[in-house]
Each structure stands twice: as structure tokens, then as C-alpha cells.
Amino acid sequence: MTTRNWAEPYKIKMVELIKMTSRDERLDAIREAGYNTFLLRSEDVYIDLLTDSGVGAMSDRQWAGIMMGDEAYAGSRNFYRLRDTVEEYYSYKYTVPCHQGRGAENILSQILISPGDYVPGNMYFTTTRLHQEMAGATFVDVIIDEAHDADSEHPFKGNVDFDKLDALVDEVGADKIPYVCIATCVNMAGGQPISMANLKQMRAWCDKHDIMLVHDMTRVAENAHFIQRREEGYLDKSIREIVYEICSLTDAATMSSKKDAMVNIGGFLAMNDAKFYEKACGLVVVYEGLHTYGGMAGRDMEALAIGITESVQDDHIHARVGQVQYLGRRLREAGIPIVNPIGGHAVFLNATKMLPHIPQDHFPAQALSAALYVESGVRSMERGIVSAGRDKATGENYKPKLELVRLTIPRRVYTQAHMDVTVGAVENVMQRRDEIKGLRFAYEPEVLRFFQARFEQID
Amino acid sequence: MKTIIEPFRIKMVEPIKLTTRDEREQLIENAHFNPFLLAAEDVIIDLLTDSGTSAMSAEAWAAMMRGDESYAGARSWYRFRDTVKDIFGFEQVIPTHQGRAAEHILFGVMVQPGSIVPNNTHFDTTRANVEYNSGEALDLPCAEAGDLDSDYPFKGDMDIAALEKVVAEHGPEKIPLIMVTITNNSGGGQPVSMANIREISRVARAAGIPFYIDACRFAENSQFIKRREPGFENTATIDIAREIFSYADGCTMSAKKDAFANIGGFLCTNDAELAHRERNILILTEGFPTYGGLAGRDLDAIAVGLCEILDEHYLNYRLDSTRYVVNHLLDAGIPVVAPAGGHAVYLDAARFLPHIDPLQYPGQALAIELYIEGGIRGVEIGSVMFGLDPHSGKEKPARLELLRLAIPRRVYTQSHMDYVLEATGQVWERRNEVRGVRIAEAPRFLRHFTAKFERL
């Protein structure tokens, strides 16, 4: 395959200037930020690959939608448009807007979970698991073992292992499982997809046990791309059709529309059950806002509705994933250890292999992320032991098998030249990797510690 | 000059769809006689709320285009934080997607089961957030607040003697914070005097209880102080605002009111340890501490709005144009809360419809009639909103039965207001025919938003 099998199906209409910094300036900046890239000022960052969440470039049509906001407190026309779009593209009958994905997770967890419940899922996500725990549930990872192996070439590392699910039912009983949470394009596994076949089996399993199937659909369109390319019988189906089919197999969904749908803010909880919807309306008003805006400005609901239609265009998603694949392949060609296969939204550097001299409890991925910033001004995110946090029962660090640095590509923002600079930066870090030192906590927050933790170097 | 002139001109318009009376009869029935359930496009003049419905300026729109959407450490965040610090003076600034989220976080960390939170009058989401955390939301309005005809200049004041009594009785163990809402929304949008704020602060500090301000309409309140309180005639409004906050330990703010924003809010405190705990909740329910669930562009729009709102020409126009409506209603003999507040006109439904029992919700009945008459949407502030104790499930009449007509900032013209006056006059003419309503179904918390009604 050549590298030139994709090109952006858009041209640039508005630009944002970025500041270049010197190495000395970056050394000061990262020290001031306690070696945590979350604590850097964005203006000190050259290429910002911290996240793909809320950082996409909207289209001119979305910006036009921003101007069409109906900011009425109740019954805004943008809400009806959003609701109709969700049903048309994602199949869910009822939509409860939320200011972002974690708002939807909060409401979902509070309504469905009773203390003592278990929620199985295809790998944890930081905020999702915490909401489940806050509501009294225990998260159980039922993803296939290959997902935890950075080198496995399994095409659908987001798949569920039904032996693990059956074992859980045997152990705790189906009545202790309020729902199964399935993410499309599993973030913590490296942006890895779930197959349609596995999802169909999941549907049948849930029907058999009378358990609800909830879809974490943040990156559903990217997942659809992999199904189209890798799963038999889907090459002739459009992304839009595949997305609809995926959603149809599930009962409800949480959506952070800051990813696939290319908006800067917003999300929703969607479902087919009228009773569930009524409960969600009662709760959303406490946390988020009235059920016809849920904490979103009218204009943002409009931009979201338009973003949904753009997110399922084949040309768009091929260019999107194509750019991520380009970066991943270039890194691989340069001998950089990354998670394979390359995912849909990010390339994950394997810090365990890049920095073998740093033990996991000296936070190699955190150290690598800081070093990459100093080298080049590229901002990345740790996805390893720091993100995994501590077991709430034992107080011990979770020790994930994957110790990764995520290079997350914002949608429609950076060019191929930006990707090339990123590759060069990682190569430079690789060459002087022996100089990189491990880290220890200078300050460790109790929950979701990776966001605000501060570190110091171990000499 | 008697003419009230807007210190701005119109740069962008939004067309309004007109409906007939017959259509509206059907539409309100379809909406279960709850204006909250109407589609906005079926409303001609939308006075449901002044929250998030204002017109931003060209400057604020320009700032929106400069929004830095970086997840962490965005430039928009620093501009926002510095502006909030400059005006409000608190050390810790926590952005939230809107005001109720700030309340949710504040009460989540401070209120325990059995806690008592005194306020001049809690507004709906504030009360709900206190009660949701199993605390008691205690209203301590001054005596004049209950007299709708009194022209006392600061009917938003808290009853200091009552506050001292509650504090003496329960102390800081049971009272995690004392709050004052400026202006007092549930009590008719009436301002709180600087003297009263100083007194609350004195009582709070003597007892070692944190003092918080619900700051939604701080600029309007500051301008009332300038106009009505001796000694402030020559003080700049921004300095009045700064003095208000200097007496407090923190504040909650809905930027959808006195910052002209369509979305956004924040929480402030001087207590770093408390802010630390608040940010832990923030990350879970709202977002990372440098965006708190807001787009970067919204942080920028708020920063611009906070500066614009303190323009004294704007504030004089704002207060005068609200007073214009109230005075015309008074001239027509229509019962209304006087003197005029800042952001809304409050029709006194109890006296407007004396033949309707409080638990047949005269405010709701009036809201329905005004919609049918003119396509005007207001909100009941009475026994629907405040009549139900969510813990006991018992219902009792609220202190006041009002219909609030909230005026969005910089959105409607004087001719729109003349139309509202005309429609209200026509309902007044046929008031004896108006029937009460009953609740067909409603949730336990914040029931007014989604309740379904039937006409009696």
C-alpha cells in the first residue's frame, strides 16, 4: 500500500497561529508543569496531540450552524434537530443532551446501577469506570486477552471474550449485572475496534440473560471504518450504514460528541426505552440543564447535529483514519515500538519497550511524554500506570500491561507536515532515550490522578 | 430626556414566527399546559427566562472566534480566569458548564444531611441542590419582601435578626455556609443593599461560617446600590461589585445572566483546600479544571461579557426598561411586584386571579392565559415551583404566587414590551373567566420543568 491513498476531503478555511518555542523555554515549562503535560499552557505547545476530544476543526457548515443557535431555555429548535439526527443516524429514539460525555455517564450510572452491581465492559476508561464506582458498581474487564498485548496483530482487539462474561454471570448472577458497557474503538486498548460479529454475539448474549447493552459510542464512525476494511461482507456498505447497524444492536448509548462528531463541546445520552428516558429527564435537570438543552448552548446542539452527518461520510473517515495510519506507519518504519495494529484516533508509543531502563513504578510513559515535549513541543498523554490509578480496596497501583504514550490526532487540524515533524521528534527522543529519567509523585490526587498530578525526576 | 435609549444598535436579528390564537390554544394543550414543554419556535415573545437567552455583542462573537479549544491550559482559560479574578477578587476560580453545576459542586462538598443553609431566598436549582444533598434550604427574606406594595428600596435584603437567631441556635456545626442571592430572583428580582451584605458578612465571620454570594445578577444589584443607597452615588459600578465580593468567602455564578453568555458559569473561593476538593468533583462531572465543561470560545465570550455588563449606560438602560413595563402595569391597575426589579416583571397572580386557590396554581393559570392571548411565555414562581417538599412529599402553598416575565438582555425592543403590556391588559379584562389547573404528573425534584397539567 502506498502512503498516498488518502487526502483531506476539505480545504482550509480558517487558521490558528501557533507559537514556536526553544528547548530551554520548554524545559522551564515542563518543570513548571510538574512533568505533567496536562498542566502545560496550550500556548507553549507546538503540536498538541494531548487528546482528540473537543479539539477538532469544525466545518464552515458547522460554523454556520453556530450562527443558527436558538438559545431559548426550553424547546429550542436545535434540540429537535439534534434528536431527529440522532435517530436518523444512530437509531436511538430518545436523546438527552449533556454538556459532554461524562455528564451522560454520570446520569446513566446513577439511573441503572445499584450498590453491589457489576458492570462488564471491553476495557476500562478513566471517567467511565469512576462513574460506575461512584454509583456503587465494580467494573469487570471482559475484553479479549489480545487487547492487552501491544504486539498482537488481532484485527479486532476491542472484541469481548464471552468466556469471561459467562464466568462473571456464574460468579455473581445475571441480576447483579444491570448492563454491559461496550465501547466502539476502545481507547485504552489503543483505539482498537470491535467486530460486527462480536457485537451481534453480544446482543444475543444480552438477550439470553435479559441484560441491557449500553454503547460507549464516542468513536463509532472510526470503528465502522475498520469493520468496512477488515470484516467480510462490509466492503460494499457505507460507513453510515455500518454505524447505524452497530447502534441498532444496542439499547442505549453515551456519546462524547467532542470526538467523532467534531464539536468543541457537547454530548448526549440516548436510548430506546421510554421509562429510562423519563428518568433521565428527571435527573438531567439537576446536573446538566433542562432536558431540551442539557447544559449545551443551542448553537452547539446545531453544530453537533451537522457534525454527526459529516462524521459518517466515507471520504472523511478514510482521510481521518488514513492520517493516523500514516503517522503510525512512519513511526514503525523508523523502528519505534508502537501498539499494533494502528488504531483509529491515535498512535500509542510502547513506553515499556522504548524505555526499558525505567521500571513501571517510575512511570516510564509519563517520563516519555515529558521528554517528547521538551524535545519538540509535541504534547502527548500518558496512558499507563498513572492513568490506571489505584485499586480502591487495596490502595495499590493498578499495573496495566500496556504502558503507553498516546499521540492523539485532532480531526481535520494538522497537516502531513505536522505528522512528519512528530515522527522526527519521536526518533530524536528514541536516540537519546538513555538520558531519560524516571519520575515519582510530588503530588498525587485521590481521583483521576493523571489530570492534575505533579512529578519530580528521580536522579 | 425621558426616552430610554439602548446604548447599542442591532447587528444580527433572529426572525420570529407568528401564530394565531387558535393555534396557541392547541399548542399549549399539546404541551400539557406547561410552557416549559412548548417548542421555542411556537413562542412569539419568550420571557421564560433571562438565562442564556441574551444577545451577545460583536466583541463577544469576535472573542468566540478566538476560542482556544485546547483541552488543557488553553489561552481562553487564562483570559477568563484573569477577568473573573479582577472583578470578583477571589483567589480560586473553577469554571463550570453552568450555574447549577457550580451549586452542585459547592453543596456537594459543604452540605451534610441535616445541614441548614440560610439564604435571603433560594432560587429553584439552588434549593434543589441543597435538598438533593439532604440539607435544609432556609429562606430568611426581610419583612418588606412579603409586602408586594412596599416601595422599600432593598426588598432583597436578608432578615439579619432572624439570621442571628438561626446562627445562635445552630452554629457553624449545622450551618456550613450562609448564602445571599443578588438580586433576589424568587422575591421579585429585588436588590440587596451593601449595608445588608456587610451585616451578613459580620454575622458569618463572627460565627466562623463561610459566606457565599449567588452572583447571577451581581451587576444589576450593584447598579441598584449606586442608584438607591446613600454614599454610593459617585462610586463606579465595578467598584461597588468589588466591594460586595470583598465581604464574601466565595460565590457561585451563572454566566448566562449577568455575563450575556448563552452557556457557562463558575465557582469561586478563597479556600485553596476546599477548591482542591471541588476540582476533584469538577473533573468527574464537568471537565478538566481549565475548561470545566465549556468550549474555549465560551470562556472567552464570558470574559468579554463580564466586562460589558458593568457598563453603567447599559445598566441604566436595563433597569429603566424593566421599570418601564412595571410602571405601565401599575398605571393600568394590574397587580405587580413593585418597585421594579432588574431582570424581570413579576405579576402578582394571587391578586390577579383571587378566585383561584393557591393549590390550583394561579401563577400557572396566568402563564397559560398569557401564552394563549399573545404567544408570550413566562414562568410560574409559586406553589408549582416551591410548593412541594421533596422529602415529605407534602404540598403547601408557597409564600408568593407570581408569574415572572423575565426580560432577556438586549433582545427585545420597547415595541415588543408594548405588545406584552397590551396582551397582559387583555387577560386582565377577562380574568374572571380564567380557570385553575391541577398536576397530572410530576417528578419529585424540580417538578415545574417537566410537570404535566390539566385545566380544571
Image (cartoon, coloured by chain):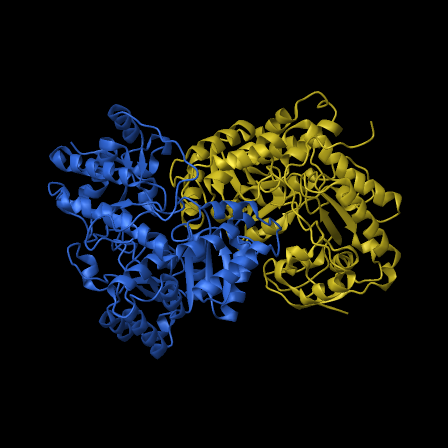
Chain colours: A blue, B yellow
Q: Which residue is drawn at 54% across and 48% down?
A: A299
Q: Is residue B430 above or below residue B281?
A: below
Q: Position of residue A203 (x, y in %)?
A: 34, 73
**Which quadrant of the view contains residue B254?**
top right
Nearest to the observer: residue B269 or residue B141: B269
Q: Is residue B389 above or below residue B311?
A: below
Regarding residue B195, the answer to whether it shows in the image is: no
**Which quadrant of the view contains residue A244?**
bottom left
Q: Position of residue A337 (x, y in %)?
A: 15, 47
Q: Where is residue B329 in the image (x, y as percent from the top left)?
A: 84, 45
Nearest to the observer: residue A247 or residue B430: A247
Query: How many labels sit on residues?
Result: 0
Question: Going by the image, does A65 lie left or right of A369?
Answer: right
Q: Residue at x 29, y 65 (%)?
A: A235
Nearest to the observer: residue A266 or residue A316: A316
Question: Going by the image, does A348 lie left or right of B205?
Answer: left
Q: Which residue is farthest bottom?
A: A208
**Which quadrant of the view contains residue A450?**
top left
Q: Residue at x 41, y 65 (%)?
A: A113
Nearest to the observer: residue B380 or residue A310: A310
Where, quadrant-wise, is the C terminus of chain A in this rendering?
top left
Q: Position of residue B293 (x, y in %)?
A: 46, 45
Question: Going by the image, does B92 lie left or right of A397?
Answer: right
Q: Is residue A286 above or below residue B6?
A: below
Regarding residue B277, the answer to whether it shows in the image is: yes
